Amino acid sequence: MRQESSATDPRSRLRGWRDGPGAAPGRLDCTDVCTATLGVVSRQTAYDATITRPLLEACVATCKSCGECARHAPHYEHCRVCKQACRRCEQACRELLGALK
C-alpha cells in the first residue's frame, strides 16, 4: 500500500504526462483509500468489522480501477511500478477480506 503513495505524487508532476484531466485525481484517490485502509487494519486496537470490511472492499475497488497505470505500464516505468503496487494492494486486501469472512 505504501508504494502506491510514493509512485503517485512524483508521477503527477512529470513533464509530458498526458492521461487526461481526470487521471491525477484518480491516482490520488487510490493513494488516499489505500493509506486510510492501511492505518485502520494495522492499528493495534480492537477489531471492528463494520469499519474494517467496508474499507478493505473500497481499497479493492479503488486498486482494481487504477486503469490508467495499467494502460501506460508498457511505456513508463512509474506506471509499471504503480500498476504492480495496485495489484499487490488489491490482492492483500482480498486475502484479508477472505480471512475475515
Image (cartoon, rainbow, N blue to C red):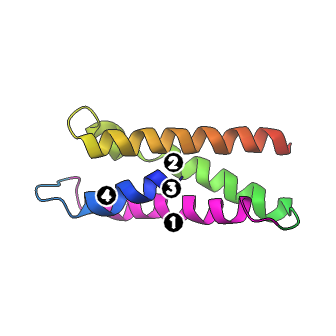
First reached walking from the N terminus: tag 1 or tag 4: 4
Q: Amino acid at mark 2?
A: Cys
Mark 3 touches mark 2? (CB < 8 Å) = no
Mark 1 against mark 4, which lies toward the viewer?
1
Instruction: From the image, tell me which residue sits under label 1.
Output: 32
Q: CA distance from mark 3 to mark 2?
A: 13 Å
> Magenta residues, as a range?
19-44
Q: Secondary structure at mark 2?
A: helix
Q: Looking at the image, is 65 positioned above or below residue 36?
A: above
Instruction: From the image, tell me which residue sits under label 4.
Output: 23
Mark 3 against mark 2, which lies toward the viewer?
3
Q: CA distance from mark 2 to mark 1?
A: 11 Å
Instruction: Mark 2: give few (<14), some (14-19) or many (20+) Cα within 10 Å.
Output: many
Mark 1 against mark 3, which lies toward the viewer?
3
Q: Amino acid at mark 1?
A: Asp
Instruction: From the image, tell me which residue sits under label 3.
Output: 2
Instruction: From the image, tell me which residue sits under label 2.
Output: 63
Q: Is residue 67 visible?
A: no
Q: CA distance from mark 3 to mark 4?
A: 19 Å
